[in-house]
Amino acid sequence: MKKVLIFSFLLIFLSACGKNLVHEDIREDYKQIEEVAKEVYEKDGDADDGQFNLYNNFNDKYKLGQFEQENEEVYEMNDLEKAIVSEIQNLWTQALLGGKEETLSSETDEYTKIKKKIEDYLSAKEIPEEIKGKYTTYELVDGTPEPFKKEVKELFNLLDIPMNSDNPTFTENEYLPLVRFLNKCFGVSYEHDGKNYYIESDMRKIVDLFETIQFEVDEEYLNDSTVEEFNAQKEIWDL
């Protein structure tokens, strides 16, 4: 009898450990997103505003890799939780593509593959080695990060004269700070002093603009539209 009791206790313990790897909020919110994603997928990607808003709320809550709980304490997600969120993002993208693509009877469609991967992660007893250290945790901030604002304003002031000159000339004094800034922006991440900040849509416009400027400077030709966009954005960011 003792052996049976010990074994039963061990199974319960291991099951609890696996469940504790994933925050209950993520589990509950995934159920809701999966139901909506399934509806969208079965309607060949036809999502209404409410469904888009629900997914966007989910994405906004978890994309940073940490979130504020109901008790106002910040919870930092582990690599398994970040992997689950990443796969849920993939599931939603696949749902929007819909079930139009025909799949051989002997093969599994991409939507089902992603869903199976999420379920495997949710039942994992430990964090798989292949995803450890793979995902970034971004800082929780209200609005645009101050370091980003500061660098952007400095760049606008630095580039203002050459951008609006009849014969634009970029020296190392203007070009190198531009390159250094862009090197800190990779994918959706802006890195400053060892901290990572998520590049939101308004920040993305600026990064794209400065990437265009660098490209055109390298090509030794500035488009009028680029200069106009530079001046328009400078006016916004000078506020």
Image: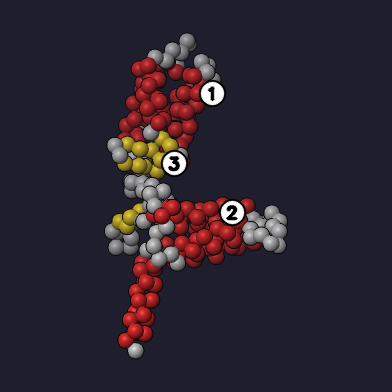
Q: What secondary structure is found at the residue carrying circle 1?
A: helix
On-image quarter of the C terminus:
top left
Q: Residues within 10 Å of mark 3 (few under 14, many from 20)?
A: some
Q: Which residue is mark 1?
A: 225
Q: CA distance from mark 1 to mark 2?
A: 35 Å
Per the image, the residue denoted by label 2 is 94
Which structural element holds mark 3? loop
Question: Mark 3 against mark 1, which lies toward the viewer?
Answer: 3
Along the polypeptide, which appears first: circle 2 or circle 3? Answer: 2
> Horizontal placement of 204 versus 109: left or right?
left
User: What color scheme is it?
Assistant: secondary structure
Q: Is residue 37 above or below residue 64?
A: below
Q: Position of residue 122 (x, y in %)?
A: 45, 64
Observer-nearest of 202 and 137: 137
Q: What is the x, y in percent for residue 34?
A: 53, 63
Pointers 3 and 1 in contact (C-beta within 8 Å): no
Picture disc at residue 170: none
Q: Earlier in the sequence, mark 3 or mark 1?
A: 3
Please report the residue visible at 37 percent of the width from the left and 16 percent of the height from the top. 172
Secondary structure beneath dot 2 equals: helix
Q: CA distance from mark 3 to mark 1?
A: 25 Å
Kind of residue at disc 1: Ser
Q: Is residue 131 visible?
A: yes
- Residue pointed to by mark 3: 188
Q: Three-letter amino acid code at disc 2?
A: Gln
Please tell me how crowded label 1 is: few (under 14), some (14-19), or many (20+) other residues with Cα within 10 Å. Answer: few
- Residue type (three-letter) at the residue carrying disc 3: Val
Residue pictured at 30% horizontal, 39% vertical: 194
